[in-house]
Image: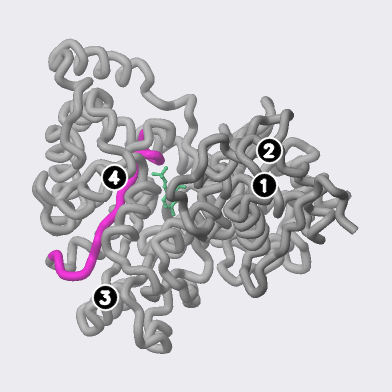
């Protein structure tokens, strides 16, 4: 039996969700004059108990009623029927106001949280072998600071206004000249957009070139942040195998509807395989035949030790299929967040429109400063310096690993890049990594870089950020962690 002061609220049948049904029960009672202006509604817990609903459901119902003006929520005092008569008043509480009722409804993630160990913060004194981080102690801070000051002095306030989304014209020109001279890519400034790192480049390329539902091929062992960028654009990914010559191009034929393939041909991430010339030709021929886009991620082109870097796919394609992504994170510093895309001018214009939506533009003062470092030959000189150091570090790590683990750890010394890909037969590298962390050494277990999440005994060991002595100490601790 309801108490005398209780209004009999009846949930309408068949209305879902239940919060909408509860809201309509209350609005019906108000319309019928059973609940009067100013009258206090039952507490959410009490009404929930009466109607057999959770408290959260009633809260959502009250919020929907408040959004449409039926009631006023007055915090701890309670919820009251609005004083003004609802003339003519909405007939029913709509689904829309229910949807807008909860303040924070966070969408579920469209991408997987793979925690590849990129960009985390490590405790001080940690020996970090987590892949491709350059040695930040070698960054030419002073040169950069002076160039930045000069940029602000020379172009004053202009650089601090709203400017071109595609980047500072001098950096676009410098990058075009750089990829023309050193990578054989026939590009002018109109073919370049400057981005906040290769990551934004990948994101923009995915947004501009894909439609939700498009299928994209990726390397089975690969770079999870790129997969995330593609997935965010609604792409459906298919992973294809890689071997010592990079992506196995013939395997692409198994999937007839690929719109795009994302590849790292120069230093395959994370195996470091250099894609063979035959595979390169086959990939370009496949893309032309299928009218598919090749998204070429050449994130560390200059960090190559064996002769000249291999020329990118983009140098052989004639602007037909390849969208080329580069980064200054490896040769200068990841914190500068400078990357770029080289593509035909109409593609660059589309990318710039997308860039405007998420970020408006980059830091033009920084872009001008870095353009000057390119023009003065400083970037190339710095690259030469770090390449020499990194090569010595690669060799130091390879020696220390061989001396310590012998044949128990298999790896090929990479021709380029900042990490090596090793296999410890019979070892679960996730567990090894956990033990190593306790000893202050950080590396990425291979499983996190496997699209299928299966391989157990591989590891990516970066060497660029540490001096040879530090690398030897890291290997000593790795051995202790393995023996544990
Ligand atoms: C395969 C690959 N692509 C792209 C990047 C790019 O980085 P950023 O966004 O710092 O330019 C990295 C960095 O680790 C990488 O390994």
Give the alpha-carbon distance from disc 1 to disc 3, as whole Å. 64 Å
Task: Classify 250 as above or below 443.
Answer: below
Question: Residue at 21% of width from left, 32% of height from top?
Answer: 374
Picture coordinates of residue 466, whole percent (x, y) = 57, 34
The circle drawn on residue 357 is 4
* Marks 4 and 3 in Cβ contact (< 8 Å): no
Q: Mark number for residue 455? A: none
Question: CA gap, disc 2 to disc 3?
Answer: 65 Å
Question: Which residue corresponds to the image point at 32% horizontal and 61% vertical from the top-left?
Answer: 296
Q: Residues within 10 Å of mark 1 (few under 14, many from 20)?
A: many
Q: Nearer the viewer, mark 4 or mark 1?
A: 1
Mark carried by residue 292: 3
Q: Nearer the viewer, mark 4 or mark 2?
A: 2
Q: Of the residues under marks 2 and 3, which one precedes in the sequence?
A: 2
Residue that badge 2 annotates: 39
Residue 331 falls within the magenta-colored stretch: yes
Is 140 or 395 nearer to us in this picture? 140
| Between marks 1 and 3 in the image, the one whose residue lies nearer the viewer | 1
**Are discs 1 and 3 less than 8 Å apart at CB?**
no
Q: CA distance from mark 4 to mark 2?
A: 47 Å
* Residue at disc 3, CB closer than 8 Å to ligand 1: no
Residue bounds of the magenta highlight:
319-332
Q: Whole-Å distance between the Cαs marked 4 and 3?
A: 26 Å
Other-residue count near label 4 (Cα within 10 Å), few / some / many at <14 / 14–19 / ≥20: few
**Closer to the N terminus: mark 4 or mark 1?**
1
Q: Is residue 317 left or right of residue 435?
A: left
Q: Secondary structure at mark 2?
A: loop
Asked if residue 315 is positioned above or below residue 387 in the image, the reply reads: below
The one of 273 and 115 positioned closer to us in this rendering: 115
One can see residue 382 in this view? yes
């Amino acid at each position: 039996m309801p108490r005398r002061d209780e209004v009999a609220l009846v949930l309408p049948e068949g209305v879902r969700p239940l919060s909408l049904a509860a809201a309509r029960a209350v609005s019906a009672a108000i319309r019928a004059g059973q609940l009067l202006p100013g009258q206090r509604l039952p507490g959410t817990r009490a009404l929930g108990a009466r109607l057999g609903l959770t408290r959260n459901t009633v809260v959502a119902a009250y919020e929907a009623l408040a959004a449409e003006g039926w009631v006023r929520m007055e915090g701890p005092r309670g919820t009251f029927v609005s004083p003004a008569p609802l003339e003519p008043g909405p007939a029913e509480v709509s689904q829309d106001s229910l949807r807008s009722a909860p303040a924070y409804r966070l969408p579920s993630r469209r991408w997987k949280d793979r925690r590849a160990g990129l960009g985390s913060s490590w405790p001080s004194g940690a020996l970090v072998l987590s892949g491709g981080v350059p040695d930040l102690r070698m960054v030419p801070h002073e040169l950069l600071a002076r160039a930045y000051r000069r940029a602000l002095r020379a172009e004053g306030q202009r650089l601090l206004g709203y400017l071109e989304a595609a980047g500072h014209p001098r950096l676009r020109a410098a990058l075009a000249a750089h990829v023309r001279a050193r990578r054989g890519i026939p590009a002018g400034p109109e073919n370049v957009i400057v981005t906040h790192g290769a990551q934004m480049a990948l994101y923009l390329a995915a947004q501009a070139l894909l439609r939700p539902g498009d299928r994209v091929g990726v390397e089975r062992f690969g770079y999870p942040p790129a997969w995330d960028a593609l997935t965010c654009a609604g792409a459906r990914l298919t992973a294809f195998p890689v071997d010592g010559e990079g992506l196995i191009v013939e395997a692409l034929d198994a999937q007839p509807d690929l719109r795009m393939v994302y590849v790292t041909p120069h230093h395959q991430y994370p195996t470091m395989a250099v894609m063979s010339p035959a595979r390169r030709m086959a990939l370009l021929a496949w893309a032309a035949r299928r009218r598919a886009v090749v998204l070429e991620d050449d994130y560390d082109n200059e960090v190559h030790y064996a002769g000249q870097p291999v020329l990118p796919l983009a140098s052989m394609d004639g602007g037909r299929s390849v969208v080329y992504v580069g980064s200054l994170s490896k040769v200068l510093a990841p914190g500068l967040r400078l990357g770029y895309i080289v593509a035909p001018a109409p593609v660059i214009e589309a990318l710039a429109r997308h860039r405007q939506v998420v970020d408006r533009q980059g830091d033009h003062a920084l872009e001008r400063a870095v353009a000057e470092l390119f023009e003065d030959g400083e970037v190339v000189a710095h690259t030469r310096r770090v390449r020499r150091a990194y090569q010595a570090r690669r060799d130091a790590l390879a020696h220390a690993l061989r001396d310590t683990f012998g044949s128990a750890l298999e790896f090929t010394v990479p021709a380029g890049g900042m990490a090596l890909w090793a296999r410890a037969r019979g070892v679960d590298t996730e567990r090894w990594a956990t033990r190593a962390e306790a000893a202050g050494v950080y590396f990425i277990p291979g499983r996190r870089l496997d699209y299928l999440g299966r391989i157990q005994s591989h590891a990516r060991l970066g060497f660029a950020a540490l001096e040879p002595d530090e690398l030897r100490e890291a290997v000593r601790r790795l051995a202790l962690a393995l023996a544990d």
